[in-house]
Image: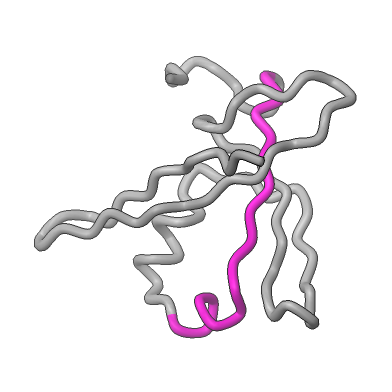
């Protein structure tokens, strides 16, 4: 795991993920804040056919990507517990 003294951008911790229009329209501010916490979006593309926004981003928990390689896709999982802040974990999508 990353330590606070590391730099996700210089370590090339790149990833891709998408969020549906429905999620962006119905999620609470706390949910969206948790989703984008620590994320540096470097590109966002609206895909009207699939009704989602596709993001290319940097995040401390994404795996480093060697130069010339395509950034892997990630999936976010929300962890919600009563009286606790929403937590998000990222998992690399295999395949």
Depth check, front residue: 63 or 57: 63
Q: Which residue is outermost to the front?
A: 95
Report the magenta residues as a range.
11-26
Give the residue at x 40% y 53%.
77
Q: Is residue 15 on the magenta stretch?
A: yes
Depth check, front residue: 4 or 19: 19
Give the residue at x 37% y 49%.
88
Colouring convention used in this rendered image of the protein:
one colour
Give the residue at x 57% y 32%.
62
Give the residue at x 15% y 58%.
81
- The quadrant the C terminus occupies is top right
Find residue 56 and report its horizontal and vertical position in percent.
Answer: 73, 49
Q: Is residue 33 on the magenta stretch?
A: no
Find residue 11 and report its horizontal and vertical position in percent.
Answer: 67, 19
Instruction: Using the image, determine if residue 25 lies above or below residue 66.
Output: below
- Residue 55 quadrant: bottom right
Find residue 22 and report its horizontal and vertical position in percent.
Answer: 54, 83
């Amino acid at each position: 795991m990353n330590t606070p003294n590391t730099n996700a951008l210089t370590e090339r911790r790149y990833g891709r993920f998408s969020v549906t229009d429905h999620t962006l329209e119905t999620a609470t501010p706390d949910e969206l804040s948790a989703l984008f916490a620590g994320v540096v979006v470097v590109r966002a593309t609206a895909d009207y056919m699939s009704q989602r926004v596709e993001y290319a981003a940097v995040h401390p928990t994404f795996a480093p990507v060697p130069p010339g390689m395509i950034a892997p896709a990630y999936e976010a999982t929300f962890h919600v517990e009563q009286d606790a802040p929403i937590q998000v974990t990222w998992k690399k999508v295999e395949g």
